[in-house]
Image (tube, coloured by chain):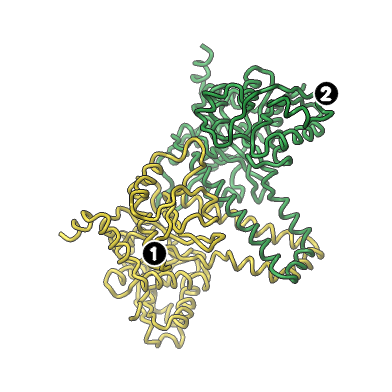
Chain colours: A green, B yellow
Amino acid sequence: MTTRIAIDCMGGDHGPSVTVPAAIQFLAEHTSANLVLVGQEEVLRPLLGTHASDSRIRIVHASEVVGMDESPALALRNKKDSSMRVAINQVKAGEADACVSAGNTGALMAISRFVLKMLPGIDRPAICAPLPTVKGHTHMLDLGANVDCGPEHLLQFGIMGAMLVAAMEHKDQPTVGILNIGEEEIKGNEVVKAAAELLRASGLNFVGNVEGDGIYKGDADVIVCDGFVGNVALKTSEGLAQMLASSLREEFKRNWLTKLAALIAISVLNNFKRRFDHRRYNGAILLGLKGISVKSHGSADVLAFGNAISRAYDAAENRVLERISSRIAEMMPAAAAVENV
Amino acid sequence: MTTRIAIDCMGGDHGPSVTVPAAIQFLAEHTSANLVLVGQEEVLRPLLGTHASDSRIRIVHASEVVGMDESPALALRNKKDSSMRVAINQVKAGEADACVSAGNTGALMAISRFVLKMLPGIDRPAICAPLPTVKGHTHMLDLGANVDCGPEHLLQFGIMGAMLVAAMEHKDQPTVGILNIGEEEIKGNEVVKAAAELLRASGLNFVGNVEGDGIYKGDADVIVCDGFVGNVALKTSEGLAQMLASSLREEFKRNWLTKLAALIAISVLNNFKRRFDHRRYNGAILLGLKGISVKSHGSADVLAFGNAISRAYDAAENRVLERISSRIAEMMPAAAAVENV
């Protein structure tokens, strides 16, 4: 079966100059994939060159572009022919199995939610992305969609994250942890404590509290938290990694002796760099919608954007949504029933 | 004038084997300091050797020890003769200008608060510690004392942090930021938005939102957040740094060629390591109390614990509490008036 991915080619800091080459590269590596390239046809076609006639590529024209700093509310209301919206419409219409955009996160959230609607039994979408750990990687959600969550939302995040990992990584019982603070006196706030109770009773493979350092120790396959905390943890990590990388570079550039050392250590340093290359982790899935919508980092290059397309492809191929829906239906038959009325 | 620091010599993972050598070292480097060493006299005296007769050292016996995993409530109720409590009592009684402990954080918080009481105008204590940035360092609070904060608490944290930096680093108008998430759609939760309003109107040098990566970019001298978020940010950073350090080590140990490269790069790697040595940042101040209580990492070694003693000493020397009190009194004359009735 062919899996079809719609790409918002105009989104991101670099637009088509990154998205189109990434799309071409992706097709070369995924022979059973088709792509729907959405954007200004007159811009896309020349960039495609001879690939424009590839039967696996379909160009869908969209006259507008959502700006990186545009208000999500205005983008939702006014830009009905934006490349972002038209790409999402492709999923809604059944013309694509997933969509990818490097555009404005808020707009992608708002438009995805408006167009695709929520899965029955899920109240709010969550942003889920993989992070490297000493053991491999973990999936964390929510990374910024919801600033205030109730316990039942954190439970839903746990179910969605577990089903994502079960589907995409073929793990039967992925471990689920809840992000919390020290084991001393006050173990977390009321919401986290109540959510832990719900998760413990959920039938998921719940391993309890994970502290901040437990994220990178690989304490759980899935870590749930509200979007405020998740976003802070993610961005704090990005900031620390950048600071450490740039000062390691600085130390190696200090004088001719240290530069010589760098030359000798180059392959070691490159291996190290490759291991934690954030581009390999690009592509966050907006979970909880009746369709797969993947957010790429705005500053993604061709390699990074290609990984975001791959993540959308893998999620569609492995039927992540079906897996989430059926688990939710099992756990909350009432929610599913309402939907079927 | 002599500044006197009381040390809970029994606290921490290593107890007197770390705290006593650190104390001796500290005295050698701070000629105008006196120390009150609190703990089991029969244990401390032999470790002090000839220093036992140093006129700048006073040993105060305490028969009990608060365990690292002991419930703070029980430690507060039952261990009235613990080294931790007796050290704090020294501050309360005016026999010491500050105290330091590497013991159980929850117990230190609970006992410090019970014994020392809150400063007028401050509702809750906050844990404040420095973090390295590309520009030098920043101070962040709260790092775990309060899991749920209202806007007025975050305002108080801002005042306390700013006065700490003003006093200890002789900066007239330290910049204050509030930890928040992306600049997109939903800029933080209601508490953070309301706190930002209060901070903007406070007369502090408020620079607005700081995202997670802004911590390490040095976006502000002081960053305020609730204790849940602050603790997650801190521990996440610790976990990431540990993972990166251990995998850099791993890469350099891969084979004889990479080991040779490590040998050649050793001085560069050591410089890098020194720059972010977490031991240099050891010593978190519990702010908001009528006395200075400093928390050292439980696993601190002699160097790290020495830094915690130094931080307590600097805070006392630079009259951090007076600075906070007078600013609070200026801003909230009512609170100070109540206290003076």
Tags 1 and 2 both on a single chain: no
Residue A28 x, y percent position in the rendering: 82, 33
Q: Amino acid at mark 1?
A: Asp
Image quarter of residue A67: top right
| Residue carrying label 2 | A53
Q: Find residue B99 and report its image quarter.
A: bottom left
Q: Residues within 10 Å of mark 2 (few under 14, many from 20)?
A: few
Q: Chain of mark 1?
A: B
Q: Residue B172 shows which numbered tag?
A: 1
Give the residue drawn at x 66%, y 61%. A248
Mark 1 to mark 2 CA distance (whole Å):
66 Å
Q: Is residue A260 left or right of residue B45?
A: right
Seen as rendered, the residue at the extreme left is: B341
Secondary structure of the residue carrying numbered label 2: helix
- x%, y% of residue A148? 44, 37
Q: Of B153 and A161, which appears nearest the observer?
A: B153
